[in-house]
Image (cartoon, grey):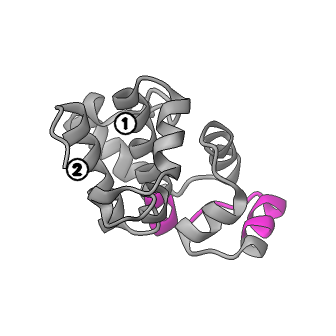
Amino acid sequence: MGQALPLDSSLNYRLIDDKDVFMLISTVREGIKYSLFQKIADMIPFSLSEWSHFLHLSERTFQRYKKEKRTFDPLHSEKILEITLIYNKGIEVFGDKANFDAWLEAKNVALGGLKPKELLDSTFGIGLLRDELTRIEHGVLA
């Protein structure tokens, strides 16, 4: 498939073309190794408990993955990539990490009074956040 996509702060919706989508699909199918997840988790300020909630895995399972240097299955790998993409999009829209982190923690009327972070546990919620970030980016506020 060629060169792998960087799974860091440069992974961005805007930069993904058709070729990159195939690389993302390949990455999901192969699974994300725990060591790569750890790099992503270090970049994104969510606790192990929050990641556990987002991925629907117990904290004990996370500890086992770390100890055994396991690879996440495709469903969990895809969710990790989706969260990484939405997080990087948020930083781009808000201009810096601190502003986006504050937005993730604040209750949002446009999101039904929920904190945006509370929607990261489902693909539908992530899509809703992506749409909201696009509206903010274009100055269309609810």
Residue holding disc 1: 89
Task: Give the secondary structure at mark 1.
Answer: helix
Neighbours of disc 2 within 10 Å: few (<14), some (14-19), many (20+): few
Q: Which residue is at a point 48% across and 57% down the rendered structure image?
A: 117
Toward the viewer: 84 or 37?
Answer: 84
Q: Is residue 61 left or right of residue 115?
A: right
Q: Position of residue 52 (x, y in %)?
A: 64, 68
Q: Amino acid at mark 2?
A: Asp
Q: Amino acid at mark 1?
A: Lys
Q: CA distance from mark 2 to mark 1?
A: 11 Å
Toward the viewer: 134 or 43?
Answer: 134
Task: Give the secondary structure at mark 2.
Answer: helix
Image quarter of residue 141: top left
- Looking at the rendering, the stretch of residues picked out in magenta corresponds to 62-79
Q: Was residue 72 drawn as part of the magenta stretch in this picture?
A: yes
Q: Which residue is at a point 63% across and 62% down the rendered structure image?
A: 50
Q: In terms of sequence position, does the residue under pointer 2 or pointer 1 come before the other?
A: 1
Toward the viewer: 112 or 57?
Answer: 112
Residue holding disc 2: 131
The dominant secondary structure in magenta is helix
Q: Which residue is at a point 76% across and 57% down the rendered structure image?
A: 69
Image quarter of residue 123: bottom left
Quadrant holding the N terminus: top left
Neighbours of disc 1 within 10 Å: few (<14), some (14-19), many (20+): many
Q: Is residue 56 above or below residue 125?
A: below
Q: Which residue is at a point 39% across and 29% down the rendered structure image?
A: 94
Q: Position of residue 22 (x, y in %)?
A: 29, 45
For the image shown, how many numbered marks are present on the structure? 2
Q: Position of residue 134 (x, y in %)?
A: 22, 40
Q: Is residue 105 left or right of residue 86?
A: right
